[in-house]
Image (cartoon, rainbow, N blue to C red):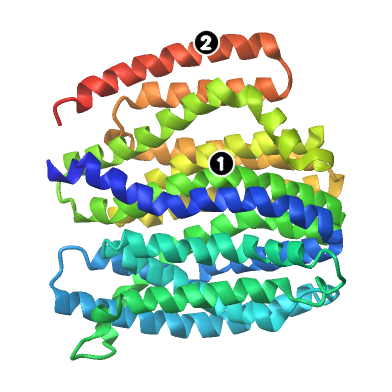
Amino acid sequence: MDYLSKQINLKNIFYSGSPGIISIFLTFLSIPIYLKYLPPTYYSSFLISHIFMSLSLVFNFNIGKVASIKIQNKKKEVKNQIIVNALFLSFLIGVLSSVVIVFFLINIFKDENELNFFLIFIGLITSILFINVESITKGLGKFKITAITNLFFYGFSISGPAFVVFLNINNNSTLIIDLFLISVLFKIGSLIFIIISIKNFLKTRKTINKKIVFSFRNQSFWMTLSNSYNQIFDYLDKYLIKLFLSPIVFINYTIAQQISSKLSIFSNAITSVILPKLASQKKTINKSYVLNFHLFLFYISFSIFFILFDALFDDLLLWWLKDNFNDKFFDLFNIFLLLTFIACQSHIIISLYEANEISRINSIFESIIIIPFIAFLFFIISEHEVIYLCYLILFKEILLFLIRSFYIKKFIIYFKLYITSIILFSFYWIVNINEMYKYAILAKFLFIVLILFLIGKLHKKFKYI
């Protein structure tokens, strides 16, 4: 079974994950600089500008991801046609979407004098194009190129300006320099480089084909609907905190989430590798093996790491952030870490939905959750209690994970054992946060026993594959 070649998968996962690992180091260096040398209002505006860039996760309309699925097992000329049409459609959508987005942002955030809406417009177009081109490039198997461009597009674009701040701490020119402009320049350079890397696939005798363009429609719609929900789930809370709470609360909340979200680097690396692999498999059993090998690779390795070293996290954060560290920040970080851990596994599972072209089902699940989530979100914001807001997001993430997993349980090996262990892990993490140590010790022991039992069964299952 060459589709389960561990060496190739792990190599590509390493390429996909390495930019994120380096960006963790960059974040480690940059956040203390931002916190120490930038005024809270200026830094919060810099953060919200980057958060606006996340709208590109919705408005790229997943053209690149759909194209990366379509080009699997196709001849070169057909691949070229699909890629050229995908890029044309992506550019058109990018310009039109960015105009609409910036129009609304100007009206909503009109009192934010620190925001540069022209740069946000350029950044959005660039981000939409980059996300789609990157997906296509991964679909072509060019993981080294995507690793380099991803590092500059995401890692250096948000952390690089910190070094400009550091170099100007002895004079007053820091605030004269638009730090977000530096971020946008990193993004533009990354986009140019990644397009050059696939220039040989842009040569085709045929130009824009309406049939190919419209073939993106159905799958793109359901993926985009899910991404729209993800935007609400992941970012509406920050928009509301920025609008209604203080800059300090916004910074603490955003940084805690930003640090914990680094975990998604590894799940994103896995999904970028397995999506084309899943799409290229014809048999259900083959898809099941591909999914399970990567899902359990992520789950077991990180759950064991968290269980063994969670006691060191507070000391590490205290040493890193020094005076900016406090107990509430640590509680926020721990809750975000758990919900990110659950969300990462959801993302790997969603790859199967996308490869099987049943994204519509996932969108239906999210549609059911979205209305009560928004209602509770506004209620909690009105109470000005950020911790409760984190627990709301955590509950939503666990609920969606369970629903998604149950629907495709026939693809997941030892499904009941897997779900039980995750529930036990989540219970341990929550009682530990709330200093219920007697329950935490028992839950930790039971989880270790359960995970060792799961490892033993998986070893036997995959031993002869």
Name which residue type carries label 1.
Thr
Quarter of the figure that contains the C terminus: top left
The residue located at (55%, 57%) in the rendering is 229
Task: Indicate left or right for 101 with 400 as reference.
Answer: right
Please tell me whether mark 1 sits on a helix, a strand or a loop: helix
Mark 1 in CB contact with mark 2 (< 8 angstroms): no
The residue located at (24%, 52%) in the rendering is 277
**Nearest to the observer: residue 161 or residue 343:** 161
**Nearest to the observer: residue 156 or residue 261:** 156
Q: Which residue is mark 2?
A: 445
Please tell me whether mark 2 sits on a helix, a strand or a loop: helix
Q: How many residues crowd around disc 2 within 10 Å: few (fewer than 14), some, or many (20 or more)? A: few
Compared with residue 216, is residue 397 higher up or lower down, i.e. above or below? above
The residue located at (81%, 77%) in the rendering is 176
Task: From the top left corner, tell me how far across and down residue 395 is, in percent.
Answer: 61, 36
Q: State how far apart marks 1 and 2 are (Cα).
A: 23 Å
Q: Which mark is residue 340?
A: 1
Name which residue type carries label 2.
Phe
